[in-house]
Image: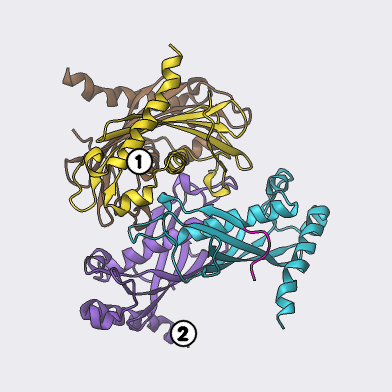
Chain colours: A yellow, B brown, C cyan, D purple
Amino acid sequence: MKPAETYIRPVHYYETDRMGIVHHSNYIRWMEEARLDYMLRKGVDYVQIEAQRVLMPVTGVSCEYRRAPRFGDRIEIATRLVFFNGVRAVYSYEIYLAGEDTLLANGRSEHCFIDEESRRPLDLKKRMPDISGIMQQITEADSEPVRRRK
Amino acid sequence: MKPAETYIRPVHYYETDRMGIVHHSNYIRWMEEARLDYMLRKGVDYVQIEAQRVLMPVTGVSCEYRRAPRFGDRIEIATRLVFFNGVRAVYSYEIYLAGEDTLLANGRSEHCFIDEESRRPLDLKKRMPDISGIMQQITEADSEPVRRRK
Amino acid sequence: MKPAETYIRPVHYYETDRMGIVHHSNYIRWMEEARLDYMLRKGVDYVQIEAQRVLMPVTGVSCEYRRAPRFGDRIEIATRLVFFNGVRAVYSYEIYLAGEDTLLANGRSEHCFIDEESRRPLDLKKRMPDISGIMQQITEADSEPVRRRK
Amino acid sequence: MKPAETYIRPVHYYETDRMGIVHHSNYIRWMEEARLDYMLRKGVDYVQIEAQRVLMPVTGVSCEYRRAPRFGDRIEIATRLVFFNGVRAVYSYEIYLAGEDTLLANGRSEHCFIDEESRRPLDLKKRMPDISGIMQQITEADSEPVRRRK
């Protein structure tokens, strides 16, 4: 089930390759767009996080491709924060054609939190308790649909 | 153990992001560069494959990030074709700083083969037996080190 | 004076480089996004043009950079079709921070029309008279503000 | 006449678009690759410049496209530093198919120098006299062939 709020945007011409479809590397970029938009809608502004000298690098990423969108299509991404414990966060993504139920791709990204200066890992629960609190709430909400399916 | 032949190239300035490191999406593009270079060195020219109206889309991709290269670094990628059965191919990638043994990242990509016109899956063993033969030989050679480790 | 209809979108994190600002090559991509959006709003769907086996490659591009946007900013692009004679089209672009009057950059792109198969130049007035008619009307309208300034 | 030292690299698959040719925005990125490689060969390491908190943003860029390379081609770029006065630098680029004399495109980029912290313009002759001296020498050498043609 698609969540109420998704991220929608057109496929850009420069995102296609000579196969005539979107180059697979762009889905990884779309996942970033969708993640940052999702966090902003939940009240977590990544600009504010970086202003506190906290970075959130990607430690792992994966994507499964089912059907390829083309130039002229609009895509719709449903993002979920499926795990967060202060030192690690995991997001999942479902990519659809906008307004349709056919899944184009689904992906996943893992992140840690580091100090911009020392480049060492940090616990967001200690460094930014407010942001951390919001992320914990999101995680609980996002896990709900999964539990219900049992 | 790094294979004898690897793919080496510099990090480009435009591949960095405001974190000061290479943006994670570019590793997916590097894996493509390394894969096509690797195949070419083995005698499989992807330009020739597409000239036969065969496409080899990516059906899945993953990458684990350990240490991030920066502008000024050169990267070295060891590619292996770890699975091939005519309808599906799986490559693995190890990304190093050039000339060093420290692993920056390791990735994996899965592919199928489709007809350019019909966009339907095909068996490369039937469509391009010569190319298919080379890919089977590579797979056996690339699997060897793994077997030896047992 | 900004036209009534502009193209607005956020700066993406992956568009920044290690200088902390948007990499200059992305403005060229934004100009394409803005151009195709502008044409669509005027009733010219580039998907339809390519469906008729007509391509519109870029023969020249230029951009002057004044102030650099950052991640977190939204940009607003005013596009104008300043010249069109059936075989050649020239667009101009003004890039602003969304909702503000400070110009970030201004650019220009030149295009011709070619047949997809033969790759030879063609006259859009003959090949697609309806689309060509719309483009001629747009050009006249877009030139107006410039004339008025005299 | 091509200079003795040029920058050569393959066209990457992900640089093509659905027209089947390289997307025009990538030439702007190639010009950056060629410029930084050219400077490095002349003894100017851009990593060293940035280590001194000096940035060299692009203030203008242009490119004329004549013939489009495809996946499988190798490109060769001849870079020249055609103007340098300490506060402003202008480079020109000629892009060829590797080993051939047919010009694919020619471009130009303009740059200033700014302090990373204050983001204000600076005079490289005062801030980095050694680097500045090399760049002045290059400019004189690069202008020579043009004078000889008279």
Quick check: is C4 in the magenta stretch? yes
Quick check: is D5 in the magenta stretch? no
Residue extent of the magenta highlight: C1-6
State the residue position of label 1. Answer: B34
Secondary structure of the residue carrying numbered label 2? helix
Q: Quadrant of residue D92?
A: bottom left
Q: Is residue A91 visible?
A: no
Query: Does A72 appear above or below D112?
Result: above
The residue nearer to you, when weighing B98 against C6, is C6
Q: Is residue D140 left or right of residue A1?
A: left
Residue A1 % position (x, y): 53, 23
In the rendered image, the quadrant that contains the N terminus of chain C is bottom right
Label placed on residue D80: none
> Distance of mark 1 from mark 2, alpha carbons?
43 Å
Secondary structure of the residue carrying numbered label 1? helix
Q: Residue at x 38, y 79 (%)?
A: D88
Q: Residue at x 52, y 26 (%)?
A: A66
| Amino acid at pointer 1 | Ala
Q: Chain of mark 2?
A: D
The residue nearer to you, when weighing B91 against C72, is C72
Residue B46 % position (x, y): 46, 38
State the residue position of label 2. Answer: D149
Contact (CB < 8 A) between labels 1 and 2?
Answer: no
Q: Residue at x 48, y 65 (%)?
A: D101
Q: Is residue C39 left or right of residue D137?
A: right
Query: Does C24 appear above or below B34?
Result: below
The residue nearer to you, when weighing C73 against B55, is C73
Q: Chain of mark 1?
A: B
Residue D129 % position (x, y): 22, 81
